[in-house]
Image: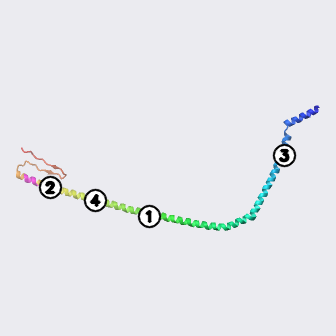
Amino acid sequence: MAGGILKDIREIYSSIFDHKPVVHREVDFFLKEFEESRGDREVDRLFKILERVTELKDSEITKAKSLADIHIPKLSAELQVAESIADTLLDKRLKAEKDISLELERKRQERSVEWDTFVHDMTNKCIRIDNTFKEKEDAVRVLYKKAEEKLHQEQQAHCDSDNDGDATPVEFTGENSHKSSTKPNS
């Protein structure tokens, strides 16, 4: 009995503390399952890829070539038409920009000529106004000078007729102001 108990204790001890055989069995089982499932899956995938490549080689490449032979010339023609339209639009735009810049330059020159004419006309008008003012000023001076001479003659005539000598002649300066001084009769 003691041997049986000892054997049972060893088994209990090894099952509790020695995990090597259990872990080894589990690892072997996992590897076996993984390799079997992986191997089949990879082989299946390889066969599917091989089938697809063969199918593409046999039918799809020729189909792609025939479709390309049909559609590429059409596409090329459409692209050439689009390119010519784009070139036409670009030429029209450049021509329009050139026309606009020429028109702007022409308008600038017209405005410059108009401005020069305006400045010239204003200068001439200012000169005419200055000349007219000077003429009027000279005319007023002459008028006042004549009026002063006439007044002076009248005073002399008046003085000669009075012989009093009491009156002092009126002085005229020509600036719209009269200075007169008379001596009081005493």
Q: Which one is earlier in the sequence, the residue at label 2 or at label 3?
A: 3
Splitting the image into 4 quarters, where does residue 65 fall? Answer: bottom right
- Marks 2 and 3 sit apart, C-alpha to C-alpha, by 147 Å
Residue at the disc numbered 4: 127
Q: Is residue 140 left or right of residue 111?
A: left
Q: CA distance from mark 3 to mark 1?
A: 92 Å
Q: Position of residue 158 (x, y in %)?
A: 7, 52
Locate the N terminus and report the quarter of the image it occupies: top right
The residue that appears at 61% across and 66% down in the rendered structure is: 78
Give the left or right position of residue 29, taking residue 177 as reference: right
Q: Identify the residue position indicated by label 2 in the image.
A: 147
Marker disc for residue 103: 1
Please identify, in this view, whether the residue under mark 2 or under mark 3 is nearer the observer: 3
Q: Nearer the viewer, mark 3 or mark 1?
A: 3
Of badges 2 and 1, the one in the foreground is: 1
**Badge 1 amino acid:** Glu
